[in-house]
Image (spheres, rainbow, N blue to C red):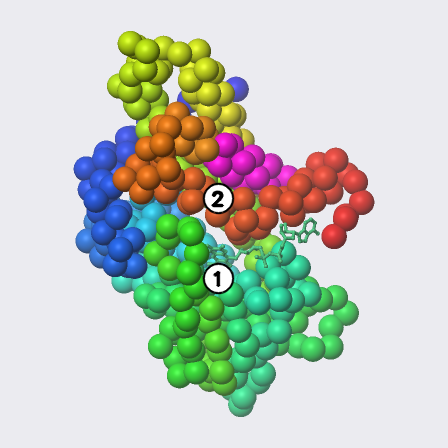
Amino acid sequence: MNFAPTPEQAQLRHAAREFMRRECPPEVIHRALAEGRHSAALWRRMAELGWLGVAIDERYGGSGGDIVDMAILIEELAPGDPAIGPFFNTVCFGGKSIGYFGSEAQKEFFLSRITRGECVFALSITEPGGGTDVLGAMQTRAERDGEGWVLNGAKMFTSAAQRADYLLVVARTERRVAKPAQGITLFIVPRTAPGVTIRKIDTIVPIEDTNAVFYDNVRLGPDAVLGEEGRGFYQLLATLNNERILGGAAALGCGAAAYEAALAYSRQRTAFGKIIGALQAIQHYLADMATELDAARLLVHRAAWLQSEGQECGAEATMAKMYAADVAVRACDRAIQIHGGMGLTNECEVARYWRLARLWQIGPITNEQCRNIIAQLRCELPRSY
Ligand SMILES: Cc1cc2nc3c(=O)[nH]c(=O)nc-3n(C[C@H](O)[C@H](O)[C@H](O)COP(=O)(O)OP(=O)(O)OC[C@H]3O[C@@H](n4cnc5c(N)ncnc54)[C@H](O)[C@@H]3O)c2cc1C
């Protein structure tokens, strides 16, 4: 058994860490937050470094890496949200889905543009009626219109939609189906298509933006379909492991950043004539954070490795996302405590990390639903939902 990263993986982590330190300091992040837009310069730089094509086939200009590389990258980049931009949606989801299910023409068009930093994706899956019971809640429909389609419906929490070039929309295309998972189709919708209206939702999560998106009689050509008509939900299922592993990696990155900030603070803040890092209570907090973050990283990397080897990892990917999100929130909370009052100011980064980490307990799937799935897949108990 070998837990050591390869030299290439170690180099990638080092490069991403240096990039964050030099090119994405807190002032860049706060400027992006105030302006409500990611840094175009950082996005370009990530394209030059080959990171936007990290897991895209070399035929389309990508670097041909795997999900372990993506997990390493996203762990290091995630604390820089919102300045680094919609990496998760575009690279981890849009690029991956097109790589799996796109036609040759779609791959050539979209993947090369994603790699060059010329194409941003947003994901329009969750509906006002609910994200956990996504099939039960789905009202968005696309009806045939000659060769093409007409799309109608509304979606909640479509992140990065304000500046996305394309929205990946999940819609029902058949009403009479034997199972609710049938008759769903994925569509690639240009953000500027007539009939698309985007309304920003105000949240406490410090990301670029999240939105309600309305689709009113949006006319789409036949080439807007991604993959197979009516099989969209099964296609989504095939991307779930990636999404969970990388969600776990993003949460882990926030927790690790909070731990490092708290450790540094504990070495310079003094009380009763010594650094607070010499106080046993503070040491115990830091020891717990370090241990739990290591355990979460092992879960994330195990799941990523299984996925990269083409092995079944539904339970492992779900465990990784659930545990990493819980550990990250706990680590951020402890980091706030270690910072005392400063921990609750906007000057201090740890409160922002907490707000970022908190998202990963809810999206892309809630931790309650993760527990349901783990009970079903790992404990082999009856499906409870
Ligand atoms: C900041 C932000 C960004 C987001 N970005 C995107 C995005 O880009 N694209 C997108 O499509 N979605 C996005 N989401 C939506 C996110 O994926 C959903 O919020 C999530 O899936 C939960 O759905 P819901 O909010 O409708 O909660 P609900 O499904 O209504 O759940 C409410 C509560 O009930 C619990 N619950 C429901 N069913 C069960 C069950 N069977 N057993 C136990 N508990 C249960 C849930 O765990 C939760 O605690 C984002 C959300 C946020 C907050």
Q: Residue at x 53, y 90 (%)?
A: 146
Q: Specify the label residue 358 is tagged with.
A: 2
What's under tag 2, amino acid-wise?
A: Arg
In the picture as drawn, the residue positioned furthest to the right comes out as: 382
- Within the magenta stretch, is there residue 325? yes
Q: Dividing the picture into quarters, in which one does residue 27 lie?
A: top left
Is residue 330 at least partly visible in the picture?
yes
Left of 327 or right of it: where is 48? left
Q: Dividing the picture into quarters, in which one does residue 382 lie?
A: top right
| Residue ID for mark 1 | 157
Is the C-beta of the residue carrying label 1 under 8 Å from the nearest atom of ligand 1? yes
Q: Residue at x 37, y 28 (%)?
A: 340
Figure quarter occupied by ligand 1 = bottom right
Q: Residue 94, position in %: x, y?
A: 43, 59
Is the C-beta of the residue carrying label 2 under 8 Å from the nearest atom of ligand 1? no
Magenta range is 312-330
Of residues 357 and 77, which is closer to you in this image? Answer: 357
Q: Residue 218, position in %: x, y?
A: 47, 82
Q: Dividing the picture into quarters, in which one does residue 79 lie?
A: top left
What's under tag 1, amino acid-wise?
A: Phe
Left of 231 or right of it: where is 186? left
- When the figure is inspected, residue 105 is found, relative to residue 30, above or below; the finding is below
